């Protein structure tokens, strides 16, 4: 079967995921409202403008919306016994996972447009529009791929277990990624730690898009996010191929 036919099946799976898992109120709350209040909690009293808050808010909105449900899709499918039908269907594992990634990607892009529109209305000007759009698309795909990787282990049918473990990864990434303190203001050890987070490079790129100033260059930010996305997706496919049979035991 051609890869193009498999890609069509991925899009069908993505549409199914959007209607079943993403069109829910709690997902919207966790993906958009939670990052907003988290950012406010760390900036109240610091006399920061909307322009200062914009990179961190956009970074967290894209990060949390793109990873809101992805880790729990396969456990939900396993519990409802629909995963068995998907696996026995003429769909490759990579196509199945790519469908989940596409769903997270679409959801992340659509929801992140809300804080972007609000920021623009409040006077934030994006001076490097093309770079920012490329960064948004790439970062959303990268984080969506990460969300599928986070669902690999344990191979359980209990979504709460997977979401709890994935939160142990996601929340530390937020605090080391220059969301609240720009990378160039971090100490040397802080910059070293922040370099292992893909979120760092989008927040840095968002700062460049509105001010022309960044710690890394725009090509570096885009290139590193591309590498992260490829590594996350490839690792997710390989590991799911190994652990997927254990979800049926």
Image (spheres, rainbow, N blue to C red):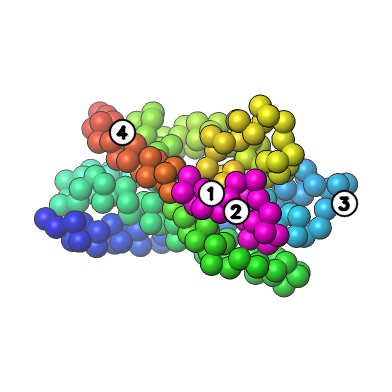
Residue at the disc numbered 2: 205
Foreground tag (4 vs 1): 1
Q: What residue is shown at x 75% (from left), y 60% (from top)?
A: 51
Where residue 157 appears, as percent x and y from the top left, is 36, 35
Q: Which of 249 and 116 is in front in this view?
A: 116
Q: Earlier in the sequence, mark 4 or mark 1?
A: 1
The N terminus sits in image quarter:
bottom left
Q: Earlier in the sequence, mark 3 or mark 1?
A: 3
- Left or right, residue 207 beside residue 92: right
Q: Earlier in the sequence, mark 3 or mark 4?
A: 3
Q: Extreme left residue here?
A: 1
Q: What residue is shown at x 26% (from left), y 51% (from top)?
A: 95
CA distance for labels 1 and 2: 6 Å
CA distance for labels 3 and 1: 28 Å
Q: Which of marks 2 and 3 is nearer the N terminus?
A: 3
Residue at the disc numbered 4: 239
Query: Is the residue under label 2 in contact with that under label 1 (CB below 8 Å)?
Result: yes
CA distance for labels 4 and 1: 27 Å
Residue at the disc numbered 1: 221
The magenta span reads 202-224
């Amino acid at each position: 079967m051609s890869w193009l036919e498999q890609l069509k099946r991925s899009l069908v799976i993505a549409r199914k995921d959007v209607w079943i898992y993403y069109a829910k109120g709690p997902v919207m709350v966790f993906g958009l409202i939670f990052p907003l209040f988290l950012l406010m909690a760390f900036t109240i009293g610091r006399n920061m403008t909307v322009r200062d808050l914009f990179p961190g808010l956009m970074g967290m909105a894209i990060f949390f919306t793109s990873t809101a449900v992805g880790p729990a899709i396969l456990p939900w499918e396993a519990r409802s016994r629909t995963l068995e039908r998907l696996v026995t269907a003429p769909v490759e594992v990579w196509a199945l996972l790519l469908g989940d990634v596409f769903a997270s990607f679409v959801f992340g892009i659509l929801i992140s447009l809300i804080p972007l529109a609000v920021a623009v209305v409040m006077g934030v000007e994006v001076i490097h529009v093309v770079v920012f759009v490329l960064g948004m698309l790439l970062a959303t795909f990268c984080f969506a791929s990460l969300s599928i990787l986070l669902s690999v282990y344990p191979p359980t049918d209990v979504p709460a277990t997977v979401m709890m473990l994935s939160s142990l990864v996601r929340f530390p990434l937020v605090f080391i990624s220059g969301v609240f303190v720009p990378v160039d203001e971090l100490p040397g050890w802080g910059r070293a730690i922040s370099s292992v987070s893909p979120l760092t490079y989008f927040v840095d790129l968002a700062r460049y898009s509105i001010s022309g100033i960044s710690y890394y260059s725009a090509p570096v930010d885009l290139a590193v996010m591309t590498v992260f996305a490829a590594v996350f997706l490839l690792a997710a496919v390989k590991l799911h191929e190994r652990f997927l049979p254990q979800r049926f035991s």
